Image: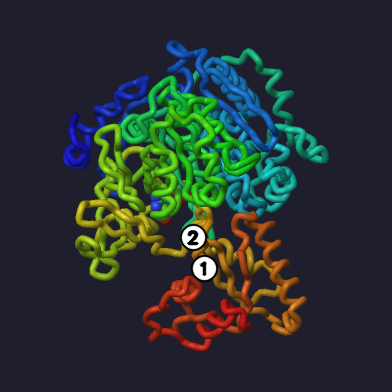
Amino acid sequence: MSTYKEFHRRSISDPEGFWDEQAKLIHWHKPFAKVLDYSRPPFAKWFVGGETNLCYNAVDRHLEDRSDRNALIFVSTETDSEKTYSFRELHAEVNRCAAMMQSLGVDKGDRVLIYMPMIPEACFAMLACARIGAIHSVVFGGFASHSLASRIDDASPKLVISADAGSRAGKVVPYKPLLDEAIRLAKFPPAKVILFDRGLDPGMARVAGRDLDWVELRAQHLNAQVPCVWLESNEPSYILYTSGTTGHPKGVQRDVGGHAVALAASMKHIYCGNAGETYFSTSDIGWVVGHSYIIYGPLIAGMATIMYEGTPVRPDAGILWKIVEKYKVTVMFSAPTAIRVLKKQDQAFLKKYDLSSLRYLFLAGEPLDEPSHRWITEGLGRPVIDHYWQTETGWPLLTSVPGVEQTPIKFGSPSFPAYGYNVKLLHETTTEEVGTGEKGVVVIVPPLPPGCMSTVWGDDERFVKTYFETIPGKLVYSTFDWGIRDKDGYYFILGRTDDVINVAGHRLGTREIEEAISSHPAIAEVAVIGAADQLKGQVPVAFAVLKDPSQIESSAGRMKLEGDIMKTVDQQLGAIGRPARVHFVTLLPKTRSGKVLRRSIQSICDGRDPGDLTTIEDPGALQQVRDAIAGKA
Ligand code: PRX
């Protein structure tokens, strides 16, 4: 077997030969004529002229060998339900759903917005879109009306698929009122809405003529057989919005062929998942991990995939391990926050269940601290692989690749660049490559490998400007993360270079939170930063300047306003963006040209030195931040 270094070297020196080989892992209806077309940098077209279909690869392809084996395992500790679907049953449900969509006029290239909790119907809807060539845009259920409306406007979906409600830690979270409000706000409202009624919100309102019932529609298409629409490899498969520096999330667009090949290759080389086994990712379909490693990746590999609706600690802190035992999970994927949460619970839960099936636990989404990495590795007695990637890349960018070579794990490090990625660390100002142990911006030399974003939905220029024009004079993709590499070539991620924060693995733009807070009538100006948090990694903290400071003269007035502002964020953006604290100040630290010094505020919040302050307009503003945190303001 080749060593990993050699495997990686070949993927960079001969990308076409390398990916031509990987492309054999999926089914092609029509073979591609060219592996890579890179005639218009930085746009990379993979497997040009080839025709395939994601749903075919995820479902139909397995009917011959394992039609009665589990494909989808749904476990909800919120509603106390469990249900499994074989590949045959999944195929039938996806066909029904595809027919439902077609009956409403959804065609190839049309967008379908999916705003659903973690229920099997969400999986059927995604795969049904893939089947008929419709482009899905899944919006995380934790987002509220305003966020949803801006995504509706950007994608202009013909159809929205939703449910009455989700449930979080035993509390019902109605979705429909948020959806109704979003559609009211949207400039381009969808013509139809399909609702899956879980019976969680008996008061759910329906709009006559627009809202349709999933169960009724399904009953009309019970025996539907909808052929897969073969798509050219570079046609769009989905849009997934992600946060950046502006208040307007970007629609990350993914292709079909490159996406399928990249996921199939990652299942083999990185996750070591085999057909017939079970994969368990604790993420949500609203995030990229859910797209790649709840739905498409495991199913393409012929594995059963677990969709889990619940938290890691209900009914107790053994629930994840109980699921591993029951379904003989071989590969598991979670986030560092879940591990930190479990670390605070009774350790006996780690030993209570038979985990002998489990080969690897993968973690991603946020920095994994060394003590948590060590704790879970020792507790499980298995390799725990920290790996680093982004919505934009769709699959791991830094990782150990145990399917090729079992390289030793270093705690707190996501190991090395994955095959296909030509990664460099560049100095922030000189833009030269940094040396061992020096901090630099993590960049990728294009072309980006298959499976990475192909563009920003509807905005090629924004794709180039945002990602490829941030390092002067160099056409490289910026990850907007800081990293360092040690003498053995192991990478360590040190956090974002931009205004993106990471709350319990959820990526949020501080600008989006600021916009939500600014919509409160009392606010004149606000700055949001991500303050370090032991459990969640970071939490949003706001510093607000009021139009009329007399409102907070009494501590009761101050507390009421802080609560009101938090509520505003809940309603506009969703509770995941709610600031942990809103501090009131009379001015924000700014440069003389008026730029808010978020990094300096962040340093103070984290107890670090705010650095060079020669450009600050009024140093008194930083003192206010210090006083506010110390509770003196
Ligand atoms: O800052 C990095 C952090 O999460 C960002 C990407 O978030 P998202 O687009 O939601 O994709 C998550 C896919 C797993 C990155 O820019 N991040 C992700 N993984 C790690 C990480 N930070 C440190 N270590 C990681 N393993």
Distance Cα–Cα, label 1 vs label 2 = 8 Å
Q: Where is residue 126 in the image (x, y as percent from the top left)?
A: 54, 32
Going by the image, does 422 lie left or right of 460? left
Q: Where is residue 27 in the image (x, y as percent from the top left)?
A: 36, 21
Q: What residue type is labelled 1?
A: Ile
**Corner quadrant of residue 487:** bottom left
**Corner quadrant of residue 222:** top right
**What residue is drawn where x is 61% and y is 15%?**
224
* SS type, badge 1: strand
For label 2, the residue is: 501
Q: Nearer the viewer, residue 211 or 94?
A: 94
Cβ atoms under marks 1 and 2 closer than 8 Å: yes
**What residue is drawn where x is 21% and y is 60%?**
436
Quadrant, the N terminus: top left
* SS type, badge 2: strand
**What residue is drawn where x is 48% and y is 88%?**
619
The answer to whether 45 is drawn above or below residue 275 in the figure is below
Tag shown at residue 529: 1
Tag shown at residue 578: none
Mark 1 vs mark 2: which is more N-terminal? 2
The answer to whether 142 is drawn above or below residue 526 in the figure is above
Q: Which amino acid does label 2 sit on?
A: Ile
Q: Where is residue 71 in the image (x, y as percent from the top left)?
A: 51, 22
Q: Residue furthest top?
A: 64
**Corner quadrant of residue 102:** top right
Quadrant, the C terminus: bottom right
Dot 2 crowding, Cα within 10 Å, few <14, some 14–19, many 20+ = many
